Structures are given as structure tokens and as C-alpha cells.
Image (spheres, helix red, strand yellow):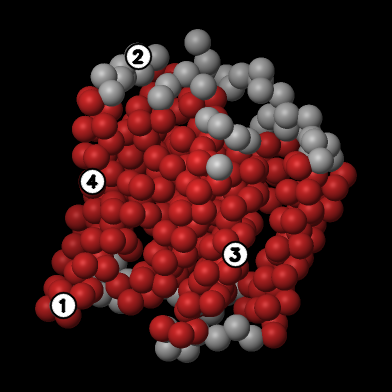
């Protein structure tokens, strides 16, 4: 039950972040928001790491992996999603986010961590059709902001899924707080130059007290709180089960976005694309629950001590 509650809270925070982002991104560039997130998260996890008297990794291969994951699942993932959100709608973004379990299956197969069953491959194919329909192949061009935004969000989802899989090995050997600190400090080093460069584009005069409070929320909760809850959950259950809770995020966003954001609406084509993606993800989750997969936890990534 604690894992269920934790994963539910994570998705509510993420869904609200998508909606709040539509208000803030025109005033505060994405690299600035991600840099602030990494700074706050690094400080919070450093304090938690010291309080728990955790030991820092001493193996170079582990640090190399932390750097990779910090760029993929930390700064890179967040930056791509926010950059995509500036170009597409909150509803589109929320509908594309359930693609994480699909990417988890594909990357698990490519990295030989998991041998997907036929049912999972069917789920991957169905979700892919829904994604292609939502993006619209005829609109994928530099001249179409919505299509480009969708592709950026989708790439961010791929980064997130890959980071989920690769972090599982580290979580077997390090506490969640240690992993979170190493990931965020690595992500901070990668994104900070971009954040500094974009700082002059912040429209500080337009940020009233209400927007500043929402900015604080967007900086703190979608990173510091969700990082710990996700990493802690990964130690308890499989990556696919963790990512399956992603269903809650589009449901919340679809219900709330049209009420508070101008121009947001759930059209029939978007609904059909979303239902197709959900159906594909549902097949993957069904295969996971039926125990039809052949997960091999003993598999080691290259460079392990």
C-alpha cells in the first residue's frame, strides 16, 4: 500500500506540473526551470545523504553511469519535456507520457535485460500506432510547432524509460538518497550552462506573487519529491509496474487542463490517439501482471565491479 500511495502522489504532481508549466514557460525559459530544479534537488538530497551517513560511490564505472543517468533521466528528460510543452498542448503532453512503459519494454529488450512476450510486443505496436496518429506524420516538420513539441516530449519519455532501467542496478547497491543525490548533481553540471545562458530571457517583471509561488512548486515538487518516491518505489517493484502508474497523469491533466488553460480541449482525434496508446500500455501491463515476462535480475551491465 505505501508504494501505491507514493506512485499515485508522483503522478498527481507530474500532471499538475504540466498544467502549471503552460503558465510559466512563456515567462521563465525551460533551461532556467530545470537548472533551478537541479540546484534545489542537489541541495536537498545532499543534506539527506549526510543525515543518513551514506557513502559516496568509489568506483569510476558507477560514477560514469550516474553521469549518464543524470543527463538522461534528470536534466535531459525534464528539459525535453518542458521544451516540448512550450510548443504543444498540455493534453498532448499528458497523453504522450504513458509511452514510458512502451520504451521500457523496447530498451529492456535491446539491453537484454528482459525478453518481451508476444503480448508485450503487440502492446508496443498498438501504442506506437496511437503515437504516430497523435503526432501526425504529415505535420512532422520544423514548421509545425505542435508536431515538433510532441516529438520533443516523446524523446523525453524515451530518456526517462532508459534511465529507469539503467538505475535499477545502482539501486541494488546504493540507498535511494545516495542515488538521487548523484543523479541530480550530475544533471546539474550538464544543464547549468544552458540555464545561465537563458537567465537573461526571464520576464521577472511579469512574475507576480502567485506565479512565483507556482514557480517554487514547479521547481521543488516535480523533482525533489518525485525523485525520491520513484527511486524508493523502484527498489520495491519492477520498472514496468512503476511506470504503469503513468496512466493517472493524463487522466488528471485531461480533466483539469480544459478548465484552466485557454485553447486546451480534448478533440475526437486526440481522444482516439490517447485511447490507442492506453490500450497498448494496458497490454504491456497485463503481460507484466500475468507473469509472462522473463526478467533476469542477475544480468549485469558492463563495467560493474
The location of residue 273, given as percent across then percent down, is: 70, 73
Res 91 quadrant in image: bottom right
Q: Which residue is mark 2?
A: 58
Give the Cα distance between marks 3 and 2: 38 Å
Q: Mark 3 packing: few (<14 Cα in 10 Å), some, or many (20+)?
A: many
The location of residue 48, given as percent across then percent down, is: 26, 32
Q: Residue at x 59, y 64 (%)?
A: 96
Secondary structure, mark 2, is loop
Q: Quadrant of the N terminus?
A: top right
Q: Judge left or right: residue 121 versus residue 193.
A: right
**Residue that lies at the very extreme toward the left in this rendered image:** 205
Q: Residue at x 51, y 38 (%)?
A: 233
Give the Cα distance between marks 4 and 1: 23 Å
Q: Which residue is mark 1?
A: 208
**Labelled pair 2, 1 in contact (Cβ < 8 Å):** no
Res 47 quadrant in image: top left
Give whichever of discs 4 and 1 has the lower sequence position: 4
Give whichever of discs 4 and 3 has the lower sequence position: 4
**Labelled pair 4, 3 in contact (Cβ < 8 Å):** no
Give whichever of discs 1 and 3 has the lower sequence position: 3
Q: Mark 4 packing: few (<14 Cα in 10 Å), some, or many (20+)?
A: many
Camera-nearest residue between 187 and 56: 56
Give the Cα distance between marks 1 and 3: 31 Å
Give whichever of discs 3 and 2 has the lower sequence position: 2
Residue 216 appears anywhere in the view: yes
Of the two numbered discs 1 and 3 in the rendering, the one whose residue sits closer to the viewer:
1
Q: Mark 1 packing: few (<14 Cα in 10 Å), some, or many (20+)?
A: few
Q: Which residue is mark 3?
A: 96
Give the Cα distance between marks 4 and 2: 23 Å
Amino acid at each position: 500500500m505505501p508504494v501505491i500511495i507514493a506512485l499515485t502522489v508522483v503522478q498527481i504532481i507530474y500532471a499538475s506540473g504540466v498544467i502549471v508549466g503552460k503558465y510559466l514557460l512563456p515567462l521563465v525559459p525551460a533551461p532556467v526551470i530545470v537548472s533551478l530544479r537541479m540546484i534545489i534537488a542537489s541541495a536537498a538530497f545532499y543534506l539527506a545523504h549526510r543525515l543518513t551517513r551514506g557513502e559516496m560511490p568509489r568506483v569510476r564505472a558507477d560514477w560514469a553511469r550516474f553521469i549518464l543517468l543524470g543527463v538522461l533521466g534528470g536534466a535531459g528528460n525534464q528539459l525535453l519535456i518542458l521544451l516540448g510543452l512550450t510548443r504543444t498542448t498540455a493534453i498532448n503532453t499528458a497523453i504522450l507520457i504513458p509511452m514510458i512503459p512502451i520504451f521500457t519494454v523496447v530498451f529492456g529488450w535491446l539491453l537484454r535485460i528482459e525478453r518481451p512476450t508476444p503480448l508485450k510486443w503487440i502492446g508496443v505496436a498498438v501504442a506506437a500506432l496511437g503515437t504516430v496518429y497523435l503526432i501526425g506524420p504529415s505535420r512532422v516538420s520544423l514548421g509545425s510547432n505542435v508536431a515538433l513539441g510532441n516529438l520533443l516530449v516523446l524523446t523525453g519519455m524515451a530518456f526517462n524509460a532508459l534511465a529507469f532501467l539503467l538505475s535499477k542496478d545502482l539501486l541494488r547497491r546504493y540507498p535511494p538518497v545516495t542515488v538521487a543525490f548523484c543523479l541530480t548533481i550530475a544533471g546539474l553540471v550538464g544543464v547549468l550552462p544552458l540555464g545561465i545562458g537563458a537567465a537573461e530571457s526571464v520576464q521577472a517583471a511579469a512574475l507576480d506573487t502567485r506565479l512565483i509561488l507556482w514557480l517554487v512548486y514547479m521547481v521543488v515538487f516535480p523533482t525533489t519529491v518525485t525523485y525520491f518516491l520513484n527511486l524508493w518505489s523502484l527498489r520495491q517493484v519492477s520498472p514496468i509496474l512503476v511506470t504503469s502508474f503513468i496512466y493517472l497523469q493524463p487522466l488528471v491533466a485531461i480533466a483539469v487542463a480544459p478548465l484552466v488553460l485557454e485553447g486546451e480541449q480534448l478533440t475526437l482525434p486526440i481522444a482516439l490517439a490517447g485511447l490507442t496508446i492506453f490500450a497498448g500500455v494496458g497490454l504491456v501491463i497485463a503481460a507484466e501482471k500475468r507473469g509472462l515476462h522473463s526478467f533476469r535480475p542477475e544480468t549485469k551491465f558492463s563495467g560493474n565491479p
